[in-house]
Image (cartoon, rainbow, N blue to C red):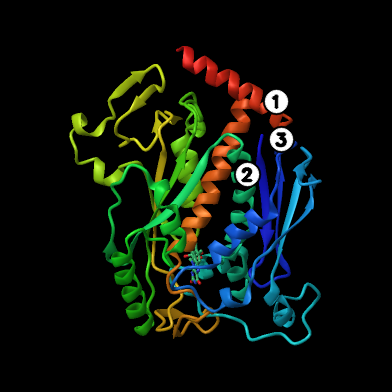
Amino acid sequence: MLRYLCAGESHGKGLVAIVEGMPSNIPIDINRINEDLKKRQQGYGRGNRMKIEKDKVEIITGVRDGKTLGTPLTIVIKNIDYKNWTNVMGIEKLENQQKKILEPRPGHGDLVGALKYNHKDIRNVIERTSARETAIRTAVGSIAKQLLSKFNIQIISHVLSIGEVKYKFTDKDIFKFKNLIEESCLRCIDTNVEKEMIDEINEAKRKGDSLGGSFEVIVKGVPVGLGSYSHFDRKLDGTLAQGIMSLQGIKAVEIGEGIDGITNPGSKFHDEIQYSIEKGYYRNTNMAGGIEAGVSNGENIIIKGHMKPIPTLTQPLKTVNMFTKEEKEAVVERSDNCAVPSASIVAEGICAFIIAKEMVDKFGGDSIEEMMLNYKSYMNYLRER
Ligand SMILES: Cc1cc2nc3c(=O)[nH]c(=O)nc-3n(C[C@H](O)[C@H](O)[C@H](O)COP(=O)(O)O)c2cc1C
């Protein structure tokens, strides 16, 4: 079973993950991980923190001579900014206690975290609720992508909306737009829409406000049969939705045509089944987003994530001081005012890990060679059905 644990505070020494269950002999290119980390840090609307951190991953265990060993991988991303935060985030008892943060931000984890864990200083909550944690999840996802690339499984993401500016993507092959997406500062395919989105972000910034939006992740090359209908917690749409929903700020997830699609009658919603000797079973449409009954059906897996506006506002909302109980303005922590493009990169990594886990579950394998043999034999079996 492929699994991982991660840890780390936003302004602490760094972020760390242990990934267990990766088959041996998978080539690991550290540059590819760092590229994804860089993409996560980009995007119009991000705050000053991203100018300080230049995330780079260090692999401490589990890789030798450029390949996985089949043993746990330990990966670390150091927080460059930690050197400026030792008097706040030091491990030893702090000599000069900083002023406590007592005014929780509506929409963030500040109040619930302080109540749940009995913290008298909201700093103790912010440090882990912060989306800085998504850097390590992106790195883990990037490692998963390297496993998936052995099976020709590709992942891409793009932004569909920022605030009220929306864009409907209708072309069947998103992958031919890869360069456009990677060149766009908002991961938006349409340059005119991108300009409108930038204006929207600038306007929000000017008002001390923030914005959310939507993105889409598409996974190509997933074989039929990942996930299972045999038990609720094995359904692929369920595990993917949980993964995307666990991403900070995400408030809704759709698979395939999701919300837009459900107003159609069944005759216009469901993807008719076709067969040819070259392709096997296939569909001309993909309203289902590549998953039926919690099982991948061989078409592209399509997931949309909808992100709420960032909670930290430079024109803060009202809150209550947790010590005096007086009405106050919420704390203003250094912040992004829109992070939808970054969220889409993290979501790519989340999906990659879940699909990689399913691949390892189905095709087993202590080594990539063993996994590949099982995969090929299964693909041959599918061709004969
Ligand atoms: C990539 C990314 C960057 C984010 N940056 C910020 C930020 O700078 N300031 C902020 O208040 N929230 C930011 N958020 C959102 C909060 O982390 C999130 O709203 C908060 O943890 C509460 O969780 P919830 O929105 O899922 O309920 C970001 C989210 C993501 C995915």
**Could you tell which of marks 3 and 2 lies nearer the N-terminus?**
3
Q: Position of residue 216 (x, y in %)?
A: 40, 51
Location of residue 131 (image quadrant): bottom right
Q: Position of residue 101 (x, y in %)?
A: 58, 80
Secondary element at tag 2: helix
User: Dot 1, crowdedness within 10 Å: few (<14), some or many (≥20)?
Assistant: some
Q: Of the residues shown, which amino acid type is indicated by label 1?
A: Glu
Residue under numbered circle 3: 23
Q: Quadrant of residue 353?
A: top right
Q: Left or right of 117: which side holds 179?
A: left
Query: Can residue 278 be seen here?
Result: yes
The residue indicated by pointer 1 is 370
Instruction: State yes or no: discs 2 and 1 in contact (Cβ < 8 Å).
Output: no
Which residue matches tag 2? 146
Verify CB contact (< 8 Å) between mark 3 and mark 1.
yes
Rendered location of residue 60, percent (x, y) = 80, 54
The verdict on label 3 being within 8 Å of ligand 1 is no
Name the residue at 32% across, 80% down: 203
